[in-house]
Amino acid sequence: MIYNECMKGDTEMAITTTNFGSEKAKLLTLENNNGMQVAVSNFGARIVKIIVPLKGKATNIAFGYESDESYLANDPYVGAIVGPVAGRISQGETKIQGVTHQFTTNEKGSTLHGGPDSLETFYWDYQVKEEKNSVKFYVTVPDGFNGFPGPIYLQVKYQLTEDNELKIQYRGTTEKATLLNPTNHVYFNLNGDFKQPIDNHQMELLADQFLELQEDNLPTGKILDVAGTSFDFRKGAAFKQGFDNDFPQNKLANGYDHPWLLNKATTPQVKVSNEDGSLQVELTTEEDSVVIYTYNWGADPIDSITTHGAFTLETQGLPDASNHEGFGEIELAADETFESHTTFKFIF
Ligand code: BGC
């Protein structure tokens, strides 16, 4: 692929558009003056690549595939915006403004990431703003899609700054009261080698509590303290403290696939670095929780990633919130606007 050179002065960079598989799929590449590139696609409004200069060498640290067809054949959630509701809705059922709604189920009787063929498979509209180095994606989720009242109008904006931040902004409205709790599902490996486990990546996570999960990955409803467990990253620890241990919560997930309740007072709330410290990603979010999934169950169909070959930082309201008292609000009324910001800052 040929990337355009800086076109209009020092800070304004061209955004290149190339084909990305089928006729409908496009890849838009943002770049900054520090050697970073972020490639996003209208297919699932997804992050396809994040290229950073790692020890002087341009390295992709976001797991992805080469075309829309390849995502469909392998794993359409990779890097995508998932929703309208990220995570699982127990039995695909919940109340909205007191009325029970049934959603289409797609995993063990529950609704995962908005149900079958949801936002991650949509071709979103988009608008490029070169002066802001940003791309804004737009989608309309039709009323009744997978059971969600709507239409829901969702916008997701990605912006790459000269401070090496990738800023994600979500904005949503609806015509009928519905649920909205989207996230981004990008997987990082800060060595850029998805065949090498993240065991020795170091994470610092400002969270005192996490949600207990049951066998089907749904929350039991219990909120547990991290203290004294392999979920305590408050002072920094390697991911491997949750791999190959006997703690039942790690055993059932074969690692981490859990929501942590984020402390809001201090930002960034999460810092992860590779073992030699040549790259760090910092996460700042307005959301209540981060779901960290450590790619727990073996290679993808084309063997391009290994077990524990990457980690996600999925910022969102708590999973299955609408079915648990005290898990927070993910309902969106017809006269409300959902707005949320998440920033990944890369330090190299
Ligand atoms: C979930 C995992 C699931 C994965 C699918 C994550 O958000 O927590 O359980 O397997 O998405 O890509």
Image (spheres, rainbow, N blue to C red):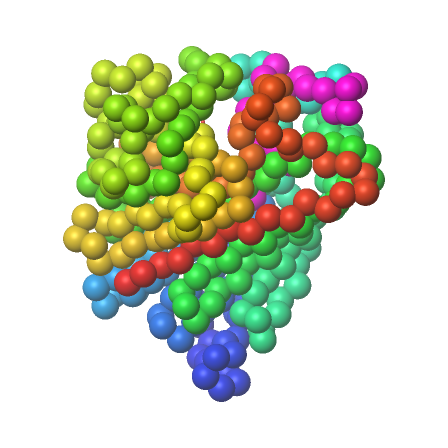
Q: Is residue 68 left or right of residue 224?
A: right
Front-lying residue, 181 or 76:
181
Choose top left, top right, bottom left or bottom right for residue 125.
Answer: bottom right
Task: Using the rendered image of the protein, determine whether residue 66 is visible from the camera's viewpoint.
Answer: no
Q: Residue at x 81, y 42 (%)?
A: 335
Front-lying residue, 280 or 78:
280
Q: Is residue 266 left or right of residue 8?
A: left
Q: Residue at x 23, y 38 (%)?
A: 237
Farthest residue to the bottom: give it. 9
Q: Is residue 202 left or right of residue 313?
A: left
Q: Magenta segment range?
A: 80-99
Farthest residue to the front: give it. 265
Q: Position of residue 278 (x, y in %)?
A: 22, 58
Which image quarter is the N terminus in?
bottom left
Q: Verify whether residue 118 appears in magenta.
A: no
Q: Residue at x 37, y 40 (%)?
A: 206
Q: Verify whether residue 87 appears in magenta.
A: yes
Q: Position of residue 172 (x, y in %)?
A: 70, 46
Q: Position of residue 141 (x, y in %)?
A: 73, 40
Name above or below for residue 233 compared with residue 146.
below
Farthest residue to the left: give it. 276
Q: Residue at x 25, y 65 (%)?
A: 57
Front-lying residue, 209 or 290:
209
Q: Is residue 300 left or right of residue 24?
A: left
Task: Using the rendered image of the protein, determine whether residue 85 is visible from the camera's viewpoint.
Answer: yes
